[in-house]
Structures are given as structure tokens and as C-alpha cells.
Amino acid sequence: MSQPLIGISTYQEEAQWGVWTLPAALVPAGYPRLVRRSGGLPALLPPGDPETAAATVARLDGLVIAGGADVAPARYGAEPDPRTGPPALERDAWELALIEAALAGGVPLLGICRGLQLLNVALGGTLVQHLDGHAGPPGVFARHEVTSVPGTVLGSALPGTVAVPTYHHQAVDRLGRGLLAAAHAEDGTVEAVELPDARAFTLAVQWHPEAGDDTRVMDALVAAAGGAAPATAPTHDGPPTARAACGVTHTAAVSPPHPRKSSATPTSTTRLSGASDRQRWVIPPEQ
């Protein structure tokens, strides 16, 4: 089987190397390293014209929206908090277009930190602009525990409670349309979201798997991008309120929702040029 091509969004910053100080498209090396460790081929996607996002995503087998600057509060109808960092407007526009293209095209998607926040905003959600206890000193990752919600895609990939590398001061407030909270920190912060009704694997985590040794989240994306056959997932009886809807607040998401019912039947979709066949994808329980 050929290795899936996984696009990774990048920063656009002034950088220095050798005798040069120039604008550069860059991303921490942990991102492409993690993709390779999980069996994928990384491709960096510098910010560009949002109108080219669909054509870009159509050539990929999977997409990672990387961490970075705070999302511009205007994107979710808020005034900036004094503690909110300066926005990266060009990057916001590019990555939101990438997310929309992945959702429309059925391309497996993984958001990391800022990537989770952008996915939430793309679907009409809002953000808490500042919280404490989820980062170390400047430039230093902290670690804290997160607990996945049983019956979710993340719960199958990363069951129970695990310690994760973390560096963020913003988080989900109101969940976007159709998003399900899939993990929480001890203080109730939403630490992962997924989109059960998406055409393909769609998951985002608030922590930084590229800064740790646990490859399971990226393994799940690469497997989905490679067209892995859906496996039978446990089914659970639960109320139809399991899926978080627009209007559910950050505080309301403290208690993990009831697991939703899962289907083992794949739904085939149109093949995009240069990308693998898309199927609705369920991660098998960890053995």
C-alpha cells in the first residue's frame, strides 16, 4: 500500500538561518516527524490564496491543521480580550478554507491545538479567550491529564485517561454545529472534538501530540487517509442528545456526553483526483 500524503498547514513568519532573515513558511519539525512515524508522507502547506484551498486539498489523502497563533476573535463575533495574542489574519483565512475544503471533499482531517479552535469556529462555535493551567512558562510545554469519552472515535483510539503535552490559553466555549466533545481535562475544559456526521474522519485535539511520544492520534488519521476498512465499533444505547450542538457551552461540556451509536457500514463517496477513496471511518477498539 502506498503511503498516504498528509498535508500540514504552516506558519508564515520572519525567520533567520545562515546569513538570511526573510519571511518563511515553517512548522515545528515534530509535525512531519510524527506523520512519518505513523506511516504517512508529510507535505507542508504554506498560507496562500483561500480560493486555491479546494484544489490543494483534493491532492491530499489527509490534512493536519497545526497549532499556532490565537484565532482572530472577529471570526466568532467577539471583541479581543486584552490577553488574546495578535491575529494571523492570512493564516486564519487559508486554514479555514482548508477545513471547509476537507469537510466538503471527504478528506480525513486532524486539528491540533489552534486547529481544534479553528474547526470549532468554522462550524459556528466560539472560544474562551483565556484560561490558566494549560501551559508551562513561555516556550515550554506543560503536561496534564485528559480523559476521552467512551464510544467516541477518540475513545477507541485513546481510551481512558492519559497525560498529554499541552500549551494553550484558549479553548472551546460554545461547540460548533454537529461537533461532539470527545475528551475533557480535569477542570472540564473540552480537550478534543469530533464530527460524527462528517464524510470522513474528522477529529481535533487541544494538546500537542507532535511534542510527545504517543502516535495513536496521528496513527488514526494516517489509517483513515490510507483508506483503512472501517472496523466494527461497539454500539451503545443512549439518548439522541449525545451529539453536541451549537449552543452547548464550555461549562455544560464538563460532564462527558452519552456515547452515540456507531455504524460499521462504510459510506463510499466520490474519489477526488490524486486522493484515496473516502469512506466513513471508525477506529477499532485498542487490543
Image (cartoon, rainbow, N blue to C red):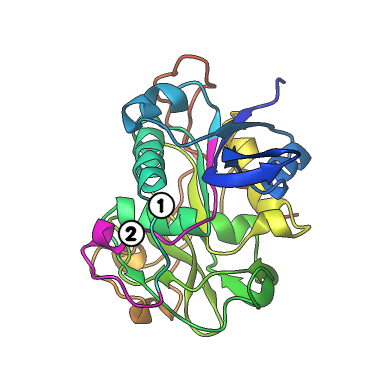
Residue at image mark 2: 72
Q: Residue type at mark 1?
A: Ala
Q: Is residue 132 visible?
A: yes
Residue 88: mark in rendering: 1
Please report contact status of discs 2 and 1: CB closer than 8 Å, yes or no: yes
Residue 78 lies in the magenta stretch: yes
| Image coords of residue 202 (percent x, y) | 47, 46
Residue in front for this viewpoint, 121 or 250: 121
Residue in front for this viewpoint, 150 or 67: 67
Quarter occupied by the C terminus: bottom right
Q: Is residue 244 left or right of residue 148?
A: left
| Image coords of residue 279 (percent x, y) | 48, 31
| Residue lying at 34% horizontally and 72% vertically, measured from the top left | 173
Label 2 sits on a secondary structure element that is loop
Instruction: Name above or below for residue 38 compared with residue 71.
Output: above
| Residue lying at 46% horizontally and 14% vertically, measured from the top left | 273
Check the image and name the residue furthest to the front. Answer: 19
Q: Is residue 163 left or right of residue 183?
A: right
Q: Residue type at mark 2?
A: Ala
Question: Of callouts 2 and 1, which one flags the residue occurring earlier in the amino acid sequence?
Answer: 2
Instruction: Name above or below for residue 208 compared with residue 128.
Output: above
Q: Is residue 204 left or right of residue 129?
A: right
| Image coords of residue 277 (percent x, y) | 51, 22
What segment is highlighted magenta in the picture? 63-83
| Image coords of residue 258 (percent x, y) | 42, 70
Q: Residues within 10 Å of mark 2 (few under 14, many from 20)?
A: some
Q: CA distance from mark 2 to mark 1?
A: 7 Å
| Residue lying at 21% horizontally and 63% vertically, measured from the top left | 77
